[in-house]
Image (tube, helix red, strand yellow):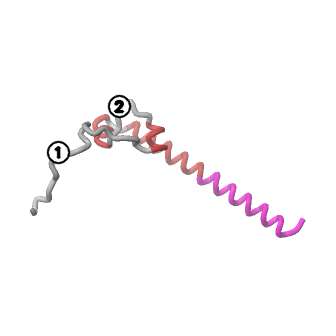
């Protein structure tokens, strides 16, 4: 076997290991986010824009799909700084 061939095999193994480590870290981070969202009280979930029947795994993976227009997410009046 040539040294270049061995180097290419080792480089491929290193890339595969990096991908596995990165994927494991992403899954762990998402699992911690799901646990955090599930532990939030109902009023905080509503403030963030999460419905009561939301799937937390789906929210973490894909984000909040659509906010309801009239569920308190919009303010009717603009909040102005008090110095104006």
Q: From which residue to which does the magenta span run?
A: 1-22
Q: Main secondary structure of the magenta part?
A: helix
| Residue 15 belongs to the span the image colors magenta | yes
Kindly identify the residue that appears in the image at 88 percent across and 68 percent down: 2
Q: Quadrant of the C terminus?
A: bottom left
Kindly identify the residue that appears in the image at 85 percent across and 69 percent down: 3
Residue that extends furthest to the front in the rendered view of this protein? 69
Residue, disc 1: 76
Q: Position of residue 78 (x, y in %)?
A: 16, 52
Q: Quadrant of residue 42?
A: top left
Residue that extends furthest to the right in the rendered view of this protein? 1
Left or right of residue 83, residue 10 in this image: right
Kindly identify the residue that appears in the image at 10 percent across and 59 percent down: 82
> Upstream in the sequence, badge 2 or badge 1?
2
Q: 80 or 1: which is nearer to us?
A: 80
**Cα separation between marks 2 and 1:** 24 Å
Left or right of residue 4, residue 46 in this image: left
Q: Quadrant of the N terminus?
A: bottom right
Residue, disc 2: 52
Q: Quadrant of residue 11?
A: bottom right
Residue that extends furthest to the top in the rendered view of this protein? 53
């Amino acid at each position: 076997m040539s040294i270049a061939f061995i180097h290419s095999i080792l480089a491929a193994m290193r890339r595969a290991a990096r991908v596995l480590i990165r994927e494991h870290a992403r899954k762990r981070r998402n699992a911690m986010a799901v646990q955090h969202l599930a532990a939030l009280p109902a009023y905080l979930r509503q403030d963030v824009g999460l419905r009561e029947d939301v799937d937390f795994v789906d929210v973490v993976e894909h984000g909040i799909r659509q906010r309801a227009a009239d569920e308190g997410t919009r303010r009717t009046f603009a909040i102005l700084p008090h110095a104006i």
